[in-house]
Image: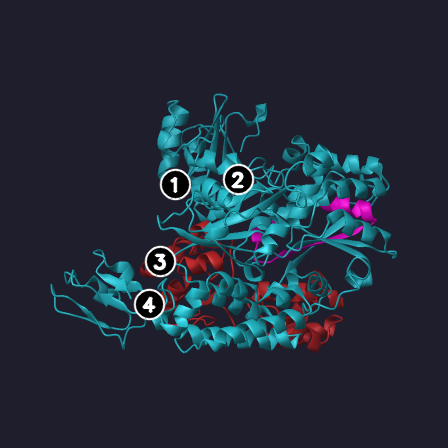
């Protein structure tokens, strides 16, 4: 990104999310909403236009699990490993999913199509085990049906 | 789903809560819109939405109001939509197989609903959560008028006399908390709604916010008036997009109708609410960490006292309650504190909402009067085991709670009685387990969670939970020694003593309760290297029995090529290559693969 674009974007982000110290989290959320992760050059630039220091912004960003420092896949898969999903067999589903995509939890496929992360409770416990892709939920997963679930995911997010 | 008034006739009401959507309610919604238009019925029948009625086991739910009759359908898919339109709407014949008849004893939905008492969830699944008029039509925002008429100090007395205790887990008396904040000195005061529901198995607050956001806003408004706060925050998990969206809509509507903003209903009282999205940290459910997070800092707890009621958000007196607590408030004002206090037990008044899940027939969101026994909730409401195998325990209170064995299912739902078992009431996760659940694995699961979520401020919580987890992993790997159990108990003691906040103080509970009630399972893991539930991978083997017909289905699903055997002969699993992924076990149609 050219410097001037970076500066303009940083200004925009601060203008819509707030410039005071207490707006550090909304600012980071806005950056991530735009890019899917937190590009560090943009984080540094934002500090020039608000009351946050780089220390504060990076400190906050690394504390909360929502924030990503690497680009995510276009289909960001959040697989639930909450209590109900765990006892319903989520660990085996996670393994099957990772085997199928040939990545580990926390990674993104090389074509940036899929990324996988585990989350604790999406709140659809009666459909356990479940996963969520972007805004769609797929429930009652089983390790043998993971291909089918991925296919469903690809169709619904088109 | 039974708003019985004129405007609801000739309507199709679709349950669009998160769980309904997950079960396919959106495509049901689209199918209805499309077909009604195609058949020229879209003028006669209007489509409306509501949120979760709690019957997650029967989602997606659709309520049809036609010819002045109400019919509730469950497990509706696109094919059933076609039949509802063709048979019910056009021919006047109800699609019997998918009907949910909650008035008929003996049916699932009747058993599910008859023991419940809906106070918090009174409007969930009844009104359209995106319509303030719907909320007003069921008595919404009337409690505010009553609060203004009472005045702050009488209002606090009123809430105190109801006996309402905080529903976030600890159970502090709500009226007393308000009184402390009201009396604290400070020009600016705040109210905060804690909607950072982080327990990995609980979704009560999400459903309340999705189904009835105005009741929470009204509860906050009443609290704010009682303590003299003009600003409020709702701290809600970012993982709840639908709840956040409905809150935003509700706040906008309340502003439009003058229930928020300046000089509310000519009372001279001003109140505004801002939403803060949490960013994924379990510890932020702890009040001082939550405040740090709203202030834009890392969510780390601090020492109490001073409590937030004296020194809270931005250093000002702050009242923090959770979603469920606030949702109780308007009901109490409208129905009287005696009516509320008449429900429940001596020291625990009112109801409690639980997210009932796990190995039960009817999982979902249930609201029961305090004092019901665990058995009544699990067996009468939940319908008992869904696998046919006997139930072993329930887990209450999530990572801070514990496992209560089946022998104690006569324990009543009451803050003090539950605490006596070693578990806690917690925010309301209620997970049912049968003999296929390994109690050592459950303890490991929760400890892994708290260990990961520990903010790292207190050494005992940061390092202690890590050491405990390593010890449990040693046991589930088959390298455990009996002295490890004493080590776990010792460490637990120090972590409880040496942690500032609830996260650390309660983190050992899942380990301690399973050690108390299921010690023989721990000992079995150590002495016999055996996991009776067949869960702990290093302690189990998948074996092919003699009745294998050599169909080869297992060979095709094995990711590590560990299964060999000629066609139509008994296959063999190479134990050294087997990763215990369970796929062959799940695939075999002849029960020829067993866990040993």
Residue that appears at 78% across and 39% down: B158
Give yes or no for residue B228 being in the magenta stretch. yes
Report x, y in % for residue A48. 73, 75
Q: Chain under label 3?
A: A
Q: Look at mark 1 in the image and give the residue it sits on.
A: B77
Gap in angstroms between the C-alphas marked 1 and 4: 32 Å
Residue that appears at 71% across and 38% down: B332
Respond whether the residues carrying marks 2 and 3 are from the same subunit: no
Gap in angstroms between the C-alphas marked 3 and 1: 21 Å
Q: Which chain is cyan?
A: B
Report x, y in % for residue A16. 69, 60
- Provide the residue span drawn in magenta: B220-243
Of badges 1 and 2, the one in the foreground is: 2
Q: Is residue B429 left or right of residue B311?
A: left
Report x, y in % for residue B78. 38, 40
Quarter the C terminus of chain B occupies: bottom left
Respond whether the residues carrying marks 3 and 1 are from the same subunit: no
Task: Please say if the residues under marks 4 and 3 sit with CB atoms less than 8 Å apart.
Answer: no
Residue B581, which numbered label?
Answer: 4
Instruction: Check disc 4 and report its element: helix, strand or loop.
Output: loop
Instruction: Check disc 2 and report its element: helix, strand or loop.
Output: loop
Q: Chain under label 1?
A: B
Respond whether the residues carrying marks 1 and 2 are from the same subunit: yes
Q: Look at mark 3 in the image and give the residue it sits on.
A: A142
Gap in angstroms between the C-alphas marked 4 and 2: 37 Å
Respond whether the residues carrying marks 1 and 4 are from the same subunit: yes
Instruction: Check disc 3 and report its element: helix, strand or loop.
Output: loop
Asked if residue B98 is positioned above or below residue B353 in the image, the reply reads above
């Amino acid at each position: 990104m050219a410097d001037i674009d970076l500066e303009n974007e940083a200004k925009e982000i601060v203008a819509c999310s707030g410039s005071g110290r207490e707006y550090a989290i909304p600012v980071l959320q806005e950056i991530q909403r735009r890019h899917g992760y937190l590009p560090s050059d943009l984080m540094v630039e934002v500090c020039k236009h608000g009351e946050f220091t780089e220390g504060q912004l990076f400190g906050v960003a690394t504390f909360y699990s929502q924030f990503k420092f690497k680009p995510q896949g276009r289909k960001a898969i959040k697989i639930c490993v909450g209590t109900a999903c765990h006892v319903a067999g989520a660990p085996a589903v996670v393994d099957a999913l990772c085997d199928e995509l040939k990545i580990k939890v926390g990674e993104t496929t090389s074509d940036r199509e899929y990324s996988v992360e585990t989350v604790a409770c999406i709140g659809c416990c009666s459909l356990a085990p479940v996963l969520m892709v972007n805004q769609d939920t797929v429930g009652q997963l089983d390790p043998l049906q993971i291909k089918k679930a991925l296919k469903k995911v690809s169709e619904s997010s088109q | 789903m039974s708003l019985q008034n004129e405007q609801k006739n000739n309507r199709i009401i679709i349950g669009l809560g998160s769980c309904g959507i997950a079960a396919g309610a959106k495509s049901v919604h689209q199918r209805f819109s499309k077909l009604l238009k195609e058949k020229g019925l879209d003028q006669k029948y209007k489509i409306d939405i509501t949120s979760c009625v709690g019957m997650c086991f029967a989602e997606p739910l659709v309520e049809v109001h036609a010819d002045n009759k109400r019919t509730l359908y469950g497990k509706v898919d696109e094919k059933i939509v076609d039949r509802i339109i063709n048979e019910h709407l056009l021919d006047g014949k109800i699609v019997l197989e998918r009907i949910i008849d909650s008035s008929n004893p003996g049916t699932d939905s009747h058993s599910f609903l008859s023991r419940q008492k809906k106070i918090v969830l009174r409007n969930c699944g009844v009104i359209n959560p995106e319509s303030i008029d719907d909320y007003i039509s069921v008595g919404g925002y009337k409690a505010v008028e009553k609060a203004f008429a009472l005045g702050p100090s009488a209002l606090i007395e009123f809430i105190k006399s109801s006996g309402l205790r905080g529903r976030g887990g600890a159970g502090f008396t709500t009226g007393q908390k308000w009184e402390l904040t009201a009396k604290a000195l400070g020009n600016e005061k705040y109210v905060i709604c804690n909607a950072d529901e982080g327990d990995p198995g609980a979704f009560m607050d999400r459903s309340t916010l999705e189904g009835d956001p105005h009741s929470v806003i009204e509860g906050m408004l009443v609290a704010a008036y009682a303590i003299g706060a003009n600003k409020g925050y709702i701290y809600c998990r970012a993982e709840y997009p639908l709840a956040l969206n409905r809150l935003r809509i509700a706040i906008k509507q309340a502003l439009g109708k003058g229930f928020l903003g300046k000089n509310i209903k000519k009372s001279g009282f001003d109140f505004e609410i801002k939403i803060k999205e949490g960013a994924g940290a379990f510890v932020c459910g702890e009040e001082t960490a939550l405040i740090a997070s709203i202030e834009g800092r890392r969510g780390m707890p601090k020492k109490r006292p001073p409590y937030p009621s004296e020194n809270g958000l931005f250093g000002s007196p702050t009242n923090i309650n959770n979603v469920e607590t606030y949702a109780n408030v308007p009901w109490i004002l409208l129905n009287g504190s005696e009516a509320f206090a008449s429900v429940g037990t001596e020291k625990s008044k009112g109801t409690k909402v639980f997210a009932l899940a796990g190995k039960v027939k009817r999982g979902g969101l249930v609201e029961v009067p305090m004092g019901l026994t665990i058995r009544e909730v699990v067996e009468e409401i939940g319908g008992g085991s869904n696998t046919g195998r006997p139930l072993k325990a329930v887990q209450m209170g999530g990572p801070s709670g514990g496992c209560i064995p089946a022998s104690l299912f006569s324990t009543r739902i009451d803050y003090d009685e539950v605490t006596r078992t070693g578990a806690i009431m917690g925010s309301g996760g209620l997970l049912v387990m049968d003999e296929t659940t390994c109690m050592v694995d459950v303890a490991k699961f929760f400890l892994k969670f708290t260990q990961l979520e520990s903010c790292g401020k207190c050494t005992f919580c940061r390092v202690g939970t890590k050491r405990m987890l390593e010890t449990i992993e040693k046991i589930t790997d088959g390298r455990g020694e009996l002295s490890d159990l004493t080590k776990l108990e010792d460490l637990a003691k120090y972590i409880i003593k040496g942690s500032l906040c609830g996260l650390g103080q309660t983190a050992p509970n899942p380990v301690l309760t399973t050690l108390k009630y299921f010690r023989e399972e721990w000992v079995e893991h150590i002495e016999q290297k055996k996991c009776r539930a067949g869960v702990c991978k290093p302690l189990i083997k998948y074996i092919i029995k003699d009745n294998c017909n050599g169909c080869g289905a297992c060979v095709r699903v094995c990711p590590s090529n560990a299964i060999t055997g000629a066609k139509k002969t008994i296959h063999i699993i190479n134990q050294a290559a087997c990763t215990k992924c369970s796929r062959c076990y799940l695939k075999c149609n002849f029960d020829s693969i067993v866990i040993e």
